[in-house]
Amino acid sequence: MYLSLKWKAVVFLSLVLISLTGTWVGQHIYKTISTYDNRLEDLQTRQQAILTQLLEDNFLRLSQLSQLIAEMPEIQLAKQSGTSDALQQYLESEWIKLNINTGIDYIGLYSIDGEVIGSAFSHLLFQNQEQLQSAISQAMEAHGTQAPRSFLFCGFGCSQFVIEPFVLSDGSEALILTGQNIADIIQRYQQVSNDDLAVLLPSQPDSSPLMDTSRSLEDWNRRLWAASQFQKTLTQLRVIQKKTAFQALDDSDSSDFEDQKLLLNRLRLTDYRAYGQAPEFLAISNETQQHNNLVNSVKISVLIGAFALLVSELILILIMLNPLRRLFSVVEALNLLPKHQYREASEKIGHGSVYLQDELSLLEKSTRFVTRELEALHIEVEDKNESLQEQIAVITRSRAFLERLIDSSHLFIATQRLDGTILTSNARFEKEFKRPISNFSELFVSPDSRETFQRRVDLLTQDKCEVIQIDAEFANDQGLPIYLDWTCSIVEDEKGRRIILAIGIDLTQRKRDEEALEWLANNDPLTGIGNRRGFQHDLQKVLDTQKSGAVVFIDVNRFKQINDLYGHTVGDNVLIQIAESLRASVRSTDSISRLAGDEFTVVLPGIEPDQLEKLLQKLSVSLSGQLPLPGEERFVEYNVSIGAAMIPTHGTTEQELIVHADMAMYQAKKKGGDQWQVFDPASNDLADLRRDHDLTSLLKQALKRNDLFQLNFQPIFAIKNKTVSHYEVLLRLKDPAGNAVYPSDFIPAAERMGLIRLVDEWVMEQAIKKLAATCKARHQLSFSINVSAPTLQSSSFPDILISLVRKYSVDPSSVIVELTETAYIENFQMVLTNLERISEVGVLVALDDFGVGFSSFSYLKKLPLSYVKLDGSYILDLENNPDNQVFVESLNKMVNAFGMRTIAEFVEDETTLRKLEELGVAYAQGYYIGKPSPDLEKMVAGAGFEPTTFGL
């Protein structure tokens, strides 16, 4: 490596200057920091001495006060008989005076053995008497009783105690104990030292009555009991605790608070013992000015050193300025040579003569020579290169055109030798077959296709044909199948050699579309099993072969309710799970299909009756289960009803078998969930099916018309006020001929056929509309409207009800939603959420049939109820049933305790009404009060209690 002597001198002198400057700056900074650390140690020693001295001064003061108190005559006669109560009264009166005049918080008179003779103290400061007495006993045992002793006790706060021995008037020895809050010591500390003093105690448990979160320091697990400047200190400590652990305060020089540097020193109680909770004394000093002085001193030292170094380096640079300028010129010239800027490079190098030759002179001369030679060579190369570029451009344009033409094509194009070795390929080919392929035959997946291709290539190479074609399956780099139609012919390359040109057309999408259409024609896309067309095909195949077998119909119970409550995604998952269970439960020769939304079928060729019953029993178990709800800890339970018809016993045509299997499924559904049934020709369920069908048609007509449904109103009587409180809305139905249809018939049918929510919405709108019209006639009424379980569990129920209340401008408190006891059991959380929403706008809620089941008692405090209806079974013959009287009275008291009112149903006579009044029941409803009637205006006109008017 070549290094000029001048540069060696510069480097050496720079290193010397840097070393001297660094040594001086480092020494000065070290002395400054040492002085600052010594001052901090002296400050902590001084703070410790001040605290110890203040405690000692207070000890002497309390000792003197104890001696004066001991000379009081009443205390001197403390052990004389009969003076115990008087002494206690005297101590309490004197303690008040001493507390006001001297700040003493505790006076205690003890025997020399440590037994309490009498005491008076601040109950606010000393709340834990057992802890205080334990601390006093420990202090007496530790220090003895022969000489005055002092100790600290911390509970709710911290106090200094003095044990002073003295002699009673009878010559016996005794002890007097005085204690004072150390808050005055904290203030005197601040006055003497100009620093703040804080006393920290361990945090109280959350359940402690002493717990005060306004003083809490959570990160340190402590609370601030007292400080010389309490609010300021509390704010500072809460900021510092986030940055510094409490145990690390001893190792921390200072803490940042806003723009200040605070020094926190933990002071130790070297001469005093502390009992109760262990206190921590923190001396807080504002070290901002001293810290800033330290930083400024260090900065000045660094700046002085840097300035000295800078001046020295500038002098060196001035000395070396001319040699460096010449060197930079050479460097710039050399940088221009690769850019072929030879004239500019020559101008950069000086041409003047130098009196004293050195290494730079030799470098400049060599650079000028190299520049001239490179310039001459570059001119020669440019002339030859221009001619060559013209020839290359013609070839390149031709080749680029062909490559773009081939690569932009959607065809697969490849050339190969006669033995199959691939020579070239286009972009489409390389995109699909990126893996290393040496021979074209390696692309084929099937060995048969490979052999067929090779035979046809042999014909091509033997000139027995001009073109060959093959359609086969291949696998791309992702392992996915692709279908290509290859056309191959013999061509010659640029050297005249015979090669094979292969051009392929992608048939993959067409193949997939054909397969997808074929699959969708016979399968259900959701579950992956057969659809109705597949079922009909499989069933017809069994019927055509005249084989025996069976057709099974499967229906998912309450599937519409599952969709309404949990959404169609959950419903789809239920169907998929049932389909998977079906696959696992039937034979490989059986065919399963999904006919409609929640209906499945199974065609069982060649099955015998006894085998069928075993299979149906197995399916009723395996197709019933539960599905977890996403993101919740609840499950959706589902079950099925299964019906079956035998081939050919129950039918020889598709229509007969479908109808009979469907009827058998209906028979199973009537038994309940998880049931199955083989078709029984003797059953009269066909009539029931027709009855349900007729009722469904009637309900749909009633929902569209206004003359089939009718609202009836039954009064609910306020027993105490002797007036009608509100009316229950009851639904009645007539067929087109005017014949009455009982609610016990059409309500269950509406629930089975999924129409109950539409019926509820019709009743709610018509009832609220009637309520609005009646209120406009200046009759203030309230309606109680029955709502079914599916509606209560629907997420749209609150919005529908609230919109109706607002649409007809009725008072929400005049609408009462009445639910039965079992209405919310299946999905209680949804019912609770819906009832809370309507209660927020003022709608009232009533619980019907209370007392029948055990669940109602636990739900009373959860539901936002205003009324509770007692089940009528407890009201009938109430006068002659003492047990029911006790039960009704107990239920009434319990309901009233929750802020609700009871309504008694089935009140049939005056005797029952009077008994209910004696038992404290608030409201009554029944035929004695009034029968249901559509004539609301007449009932309102006679709203006083006149049973003969609208009752029996």
Image: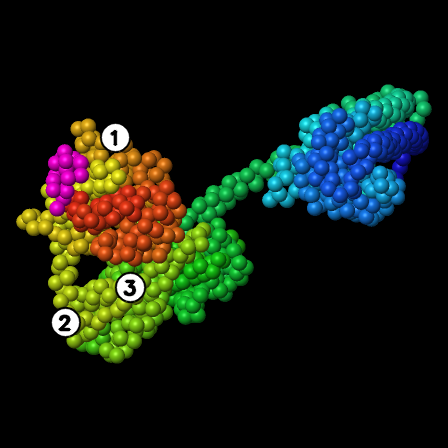
Q: Is residue 928 left or right of residue 262?
A: left
Q: Residue at x 78, y 35 (%)?
A: 74
**Where does the image place residue 827, in percent across and percent down from the top left?**
36, 52
Q: Is residue 938 magenta?
A: yes
Using the rendered view, name the quadrant where residue 78 is placed. top right
Q: Residue at x 25, y 57 (%)?
A: 881
* Contact check, label 3 and label 2, Cβ < 8 Å: no
Q: Is residue 20 magenta?
A: no
In this view, the residue in front, 207 or 255, is 207
Kindly report the distance in space between the C-alpha atoms of the residues bearing marks 3 and 2. Answer: 22 Å
Q: Residue at x 20, y 49 (%)?
A: 911
Q: Residue at x 75, y 43 (%)?
A: 81
Q: Is residue 464 above or below residue 939?
A: below
**Viewer-nearest of labels 1 and 2?**
1
Label 1 packing within 10 angstroms: few (<14), some (14-19), many (20+): few
Q: Which residue is mark 2?
A: 681
In this view, the residue in front, 862 or 35, is 862
Q: Circle 1 sits in a helix, a strand or a loop, which is it?
A: loop
Q: Which residue is mark 1?
A: 809
* Magenta region: 934-952
**Where does the image place residue 950, in percent across and percent down from the top left?**
13, 41
**Three-letter amino acid code of the residue under disc 2:** Pro
Q: Which residue is mark 3?
A: 673
Kindly report the distance in space between the C-alpha atoms of the residues bearing marks 3 and 1. Answer: 44 Å
Q: Is residue 918 left or right of residue 42?
A: left
Q: Is residue 891 visible?
A: yes
User: How many labels were placed on the picture?
Assistant: 3
**Where does the image place residue 278, in percent across and percent down from the top left?**
75, 42
